[in-house]
Image: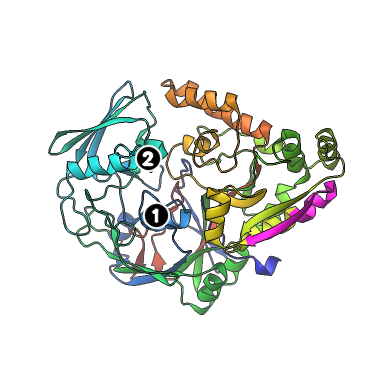
Amino acid sequence: MRRNRKLFLMIIAAIVMINIITLVGCGKEVNTSKTSNTKEGKANGNIKEGGSIVLTTSEPDFLDPDLATAADTRSILFNVFEGLVKPDENGNLIDAVASSHEISKDGLKYTFKLRKGIRFHNNKPVTVQDVKYSLDRAAGKDTGKPLKTELVNIKSVDIKDSSTIEVNLTAPDTDFLPYLTVAIIPKGYKNQNSKPIGTGPFKLVEYDKQQKIELAKNKDYWQKGLPHLDKVTYKIEDANALFLGLKAGNIDSGFITKEQADQLKTSYNTLIGSANLLQLLALNNSKKPFNDVRVRQALYYAIDTKSIIDTVADGVGKRAGTNFLSSFKKYYKAGLEKTYTQNINKAKKLLAEAGYPNGFETTITVPSVYQFHVDTAQIIVEQLKAINVKASIKKVEWGEWLEKTYKGRQYDSTVVSLDAAYLSPRALLGRYVSTDASNFLNYKNNNYDELYRKAVNEIDDNKKVEDYKELQEILNQDAASIYIQDQQKVVVLKKGLAGYKFYPTYVQDLASMYYTN
């Protein structure tokens, strides 16, 4: 199994502060916190402008930024679209389409000044009308069906003058700014899913289904000096092809396992940082036997998550005890990963109490494109035999997983990794609210729902932190799913290529990458 482990690019993070990353090349560790910084590189005359790189990705679900949910897709679109604000590599929200913003003390009003001279990829200037249209569209103001449920708190988007836009909320929310990273698009433009137009550092110039995606440098990008590369090509390939392409030198960078990276030291440097992904055995809480909390807890006690990390991830990962990522340092409830240490006797006792003294049969659905998850599921199958649970693995294509497992919720359990699309802790917690569209686990707890609403509306930051930690405890106690690991990302970068940045969300910033002189 160890030789067959492949890339772990996962789907559907998170305030991670990664200012120092580790570069491993030819057995030597180097602090790259300075050399990876674009400004520092310029000062040293180390940046060679131009050039192109080749990467790999999975088939995108949507190119329309308001419809895309797959993490791989959103990682690409991060370079094509921008919101009023956008995240940087240190977990800060910086002004993008807007040049400045103000938040009222009561958390009801967000005011933005539009950046002067900013243009879309079709060379048309961005106007306040475009901003209003984009936010209204995403919030579903005209249709009543929000494309981004995170924006339902918007009461109105008001144009104050030719450069000022005001976002008014129905209820106070001092933590709403991360949701205003939603893409700004041209008013009335209907072809976002086939020919997307944004304001980002790269424009999408070609999409050949199941073959490739090509991005070209936006020469009129508002942030001067960026991007450095002229062209980026994404080959749409599976994990097998990625490693083979790296070995052949045809791919310039990719996310792989530590074991694979060790085989590429001659031609590639290795960087390790937070993946901002949480791997779990997701359980369908509305389906027997997983509608019984004792059964869910029994599985948690039966599974040794540390051995999974050691075997599948080469030990590069952290045990998880809830849906939260440890990179949310301020809000993270430490210690929950110790709740369910492997205890077979306790697991059997819980199963007996739930009416399953002889165990049961179940199916673990896994997207076949991700060998990392397939390998994890295989270990889980073996571990569950100790409590007489007979689990079988059902491998499905990526599109089928999205349609039937995620959207249709037609599954018993599934191994997957979840990320957060926004720099907000509740982006991780909101998907467990019983009425949330992304709650594909069908988890339902009225106390959780009430506390979540309280936390969202809480203005006192200290109380909000307490509420977020209590929500994590509820998910842990309910064993809403089996939380396996807070993943670490192993990135290989072809020698001569630099500027890679680890972000607090699952994105890949192509604008910062460059060739060295």
Q: Magenta span covers which residues?
A: 381-395
Identify the image quadrant of residue 474: top right
Identify the image quadrant of residue 500: bottom left
Nearer to the camera, 464 or 142: 142
Residue 352, horizontal then vertical, whole percent: 85, 36
Nearer-N-terminus badge (2/1): 1
Q: Which amino acid does label 2 sit on?
A: Pro
Q: Give the labeled residue for mark 2.
A: 146
Whether residue 341 is visible to the viewer of this picture, yes or no, is: no
Query: Which disc, if any, is residue 266?
Result: none
Q: Is 135 rendered above or below residue 270?
A: above
Q: In this view, does 307 lie to the left or right of 186?
A: right
Say how the picture is coloured: rainbow
Residue 415, horizontal then vertical, whole percent: 63, 52
Nearer to the camera, 40 or 447: 447
- As for residue 424 lying within the magenta part, the answer is no
Quick one: label 2, few (<14), some, or many (20+) residues within 10 Å? some
Which residue sits at x=80%, y=47%? 360
Nearer to the camera, 35 or 393: 393
Query: Which disc, if any, is residue 34?
Result: 1
Whether residue 334 is visible to the viewer of this picture, yes or no, is: yes
Which residue sits at x=27%, y=57%? 197
Quick one: label 1, few (<14), some, or many (20+) residues within 10 Å? some
Residue 310, horizontal then vertical, whole percent: 70, 55
Q: Is residue 134 left or right of residue 392?
A: left
Which residue sits at x=15%, y=39%? 163
Which SS class for mark 2? loop
